[in-house]
Image (cartoon, rainbow, N blue to C red):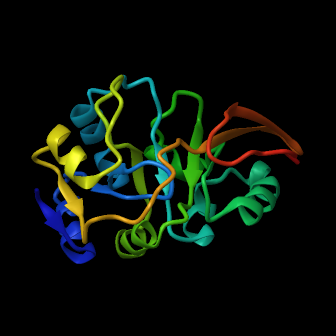
Amino acid sequence: MNLVNCKTALKTLKSGLPIIFPTDTLPAIGCLPKFSNIIYEFKKRDRNKPLILMGSEHKHLIDYVHQTAKEDYEKIASKYWPGAVTIVIPSSEEQTVNLTSNDLTIGLRIPNSYMAQSLLRETGPLLTSSANISGLKGSITAEGIALDFPSVKILGPIPWGKSSGKGSTVISWKKSGDWRLIREGEVLVRELY
């Protein structure tokens, strides 16, 4: 198993390769935004399925949000982050180069995980997906994931702390004050306003 610390992980990411790290939900495979194709290759993921941009702090993600949605984004982000809620929101015009969706939206999340946040503070926002081969149930342990991705470096130390093993709840912004539940996950979202 190729274990790395946060500093070594940054070198790996800058070289265009992904890193696997724990989150509060499922382990993630992440890369610097300009290298998004690498995750699709390693996961064998359909390129029509977007990735999630994770950050360590709200201020690191706000520039990715379109001006028309910023107020609603701030309300939801302050209520649910850090945590297991992914916000799909229109992307700012300046950040469209980082999009992996076809509809000018971007999924954003701040995980409630010390290890994930430590990595993201070192690297800046990372495009991510769950650390499994697409279509297959993945492991939630570093040891199990190393079997699926033997060449990918894994953030240590291990064993990782406890995670839920369940995907994040995904909500999508439609217009001012109007959110939709896309996928029920770890967090039960009772009011979307």
**Quarter assignment of residue 190:** top right
Horizontally, is 147 left or right of 45 in the view? left
Rendered view: 116 above or below 46: below
Horizontally, is 135 left or right of 77 in the view? left
**Quarter assignment of residue 13:** bottom left
Q: Position of residue 173 (x, y in %)?
A: 75, 40
Q: Position of residue 156 (x, y in %)?
A: 24, 68
Q: Position of residue 29 (x, y in %)?
A: 32, 48
Horizontally, is 37 left or right of 105 in the view? left
Horizontally, is 186 left or right of 119 in the view? right
Q: Residue at x 44, y 45 (%)?
A: 97
Front-most of residues 96 and 173? 173
Front-most of residues 150 and 142? 142
Q: How many marks?
A: 0
Q: Residue at x 48, y 67 (%)?
A: 113
Q: Position of residue 171 (x, y in %)?
A: 70, 40
Q: Residue at x 77, y 62 (%)?
A: 79
Q: Residue at x 35, y 75 (%)?
A: 122
Q: Which quarter shows the N terminus? A: bottom left
Front-most of residues 55 and 133? 133
Front-most of residues 187 and 129? 187
